[in-house]
Image (cartoon, rainbow, N blue to C red):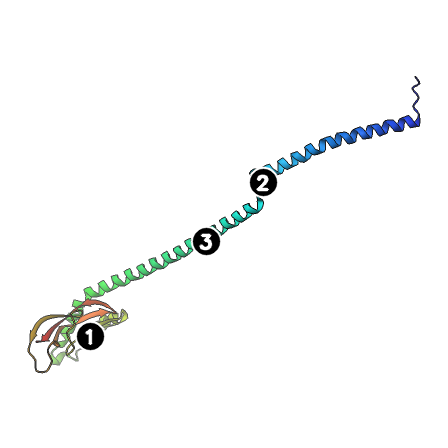
Amino acid sequence: MSDFESPADELEREEEAAASADETENECAPEQGEELAEEAEEQLDLPEGANLLQMLIEAQKEAQANEDGWQRARAEFSNYKKRIERERTELFQRAALDTLQALLPIIDDFDRAFESVPGPLEEDPWIGGVAMIQRKFAGVLEQYEVEAIDPTGAAFDPNLHQAIGAEESDEVESGHVIATLQKGYRAGDTVLRLALVKVAS
């Protein structure tokens, strides 16, 4: 047989080679598609038969629940801060009032001292200096809105007054204060000290 190959034979051989290559490519294509699908599934880590729409809805619900929890925690923390601030303010005020309460006997001493100053000494500069100290005490009381309770002539109130005696009176009706023996003090609704009084019987 001759080794000579005609143009027709060469063309036929090239067509056979091309057909064989197409078959090989077609056989590999499904396998490559399956590999790509498996690779995508592994990257998404989706369970078998997963519904993407359902997963999206559940993710949105979870995000909303997390946001609600964050807002609730934020509100609770804000309320906690307000409560701590209120308690701190009340503690400071209570401590200040306790200190003022301890000073009340000194203020009483000043009042009694000035009630009994001899006439010739009323204009003495030294008395004037002591009076200035008394006014400073009064200024401190005023700063903390502390007011004196001097109920002479008013109806007896056990929440503000402490009766240490009772006697008949033609000038004050029964159950009213005849005289205030020691002034009381209060700051707003807080009574620092009850007023000591005599009551008409």
Location of residue 21 by image quarter: top right
| Residue occupied by mark 3 | 68
At x 93% / y 21%, what residue is drawn? 4
Q: Position of residue 98 (x, y in %)?
A: 22, 63
- How far apart marks 2 and 1 lie (CA) works out to 88 Å
Image spot of residue 116 (x, y percent) = 11, 76
Task: Identify the image quadrant of residue 150.
Answer: bottom left
Q: Which residue is mark 1?
A: 131
* Residue kind at label 3, given as amino acid type: Asp
Q: In the drawing, what numbered circle is on residue 44?
A: 2
Q: Earlier in the sequence, mark 3 or mark 1?
A: 3
- The amino acid pointed to by label 1 is Ala
Between 129 and 96, the residue placed more toward the observer is 96
Q: What residue lies at 10% left-to-right and 82% top-to-bottom?
A: 171
Measure how far apart labels 2 and 3 are at the Cα level. Answer: 28 Å
Q: Are marks 2 and 1 in contact (CB under 8 Å)?
A: no
Structural distance between the alpha carbons of marks 3 and 1: 64 Å
Q: Are marks 2 and 3 in contact (CB under 8 Å)?
A: no
Q: Is residue 82 left or right of residue 54?
A: left
Q: Nearer the viewer, residue 46 or 201?
A: 46
Query: From the viewer's perspective, is 77 left or right of 140?
Result: right
Quarter of the figure with the C terminus: bottom left
Q: Residues within 10 Å of mark 1 (few under 14, many from 20)?
A: some
